[in-house]
Image (cartoon, rainbow, N blue to C red):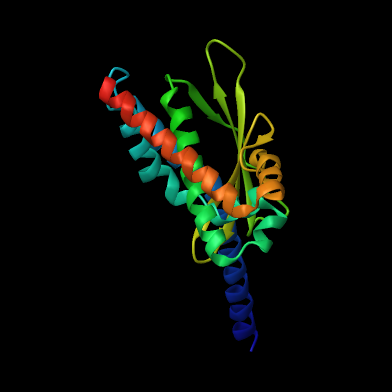
């Protein structure tokens, strides 16, 4: 009986240890994900020649290939629209997500096109109050000609998707909620369909401008 009791205690301890190890891996996963993606993106950018006429298109391709799979655009859209997300019907929600996604892609593309071998430094990872659901990864872009730029990645964990980024803070300013006031103003004045149409025109105009630049080059 004593041996059997001892074996049970050992089995329980091993089980608890396994759970703790699994949780520890899960805690580290957000930072590892962001670091890996960042490393892959920077490596890809270094391979694109600054004088390449198709540089913009190649950067855009890398954004779609390496970054987009790790972004939660539905969560981003909910943050950007706030109360208006709940007021929108499913068709409006879907169309907004598509156009907001394209807008963010353009934003990332523009930022990455300006990359010139700056160093990205990651700060020590600190566990959140909800380590199994949310996490924040802190980093800095170290510049040779100016102060470092702090960039914080907010991630959420879902069993079906794993860890995904739902917001990015640049110098303390949320990239997603930064759009909220302008979106709210436009919706209150003209309605959500007008906002979606405006975003579509904006995205189409940016695409035509980029195509025009490529032709000129």
Quadrant (top left, top right, bottom left, bottom right) of the C terminus: top left
Residue 28 appears in view: no
Does residue 103 appear left or right of residue 175 in this picture? Answer: left
Which quadrant would residue 156 be assigned to in this image? bottom right
Residue in the picture at 56% in, 60% down? 92
Residue 92 vs residue 38, the one in the foreground: 92
Residue in the picture at 56% in, 66% down? 90
Which quadrant would residue 133 be assigned to in this image? bottom right
Which quadrant would residue 198 be assigned to in this image? top right
Residue 195 vs residue 167, the one in the foreground: 195
Residue 53 location in percent, x, y?
A: 27, 22
Q: Residue furthest top?
A: 145
Residue 85 vs residue 76, the one in the foreground: 85
Does residue 186 appear left or right of residue 56 in this picture? Answer: right
Residue 179 appears in view: yes
Residue 147 location in percent, x, y?
A: 62, 16
Q: Is residue 215 above or below residue 192?
A: above
Q: Residue furthest bottom?
A: 1
Residue 7 location in percent, x, y?
A: 58, 79
Residue 136 location in percent, x, y?
A: 63, 44
Residue in the picture at 58% in, 49% down? 194
Q: Residue furthest front?
A: 190
């Amino acid at each position: 009986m004593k041996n059997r009791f001892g074996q049970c205690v050992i089995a329980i301890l091993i089980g608890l240890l396994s759970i703790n190890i699994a949780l520890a891996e899960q805690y580290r996963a957000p930072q590892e994900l962001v670091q890996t993606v960042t490393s892959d993106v920077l490596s890809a950018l270094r391979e694109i020649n600054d004088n390449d006429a198709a540089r913009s298109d190649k950067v855009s391709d890398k954004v779609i290939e390496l970054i987009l799979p790790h972004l939660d655009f539905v969560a981003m859209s909910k943050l950007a629209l706030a109360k208006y997300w709940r007021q929108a019907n499913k068709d409006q929600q879907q169309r907004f997500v598509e156009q907001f996604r394209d807008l963010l892609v353009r934003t990332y593309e523009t930022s990455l096109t300006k990359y010139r071998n700056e160093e990205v430094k990651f700060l020590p990872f600190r566990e959140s109050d909800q380590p199994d659901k949310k996490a924040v990864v802190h980093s800095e872009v170290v510049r040779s000609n100016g102060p470092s730029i702090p960039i914080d990645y907010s991630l959420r964990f879902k069993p079906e998707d794993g860890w995904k980024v739902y917001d990015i803070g640049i110098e303390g300013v949320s990239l997603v909620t930064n759009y909220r006031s302008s979106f709210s103003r436009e919706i209150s004045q003209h309605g959500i369909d007008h906002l979606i149409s405006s975003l579509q025109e904006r995205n189409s105009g940016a695409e035509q401008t980029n195509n025009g630049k490529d032709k000129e080059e």
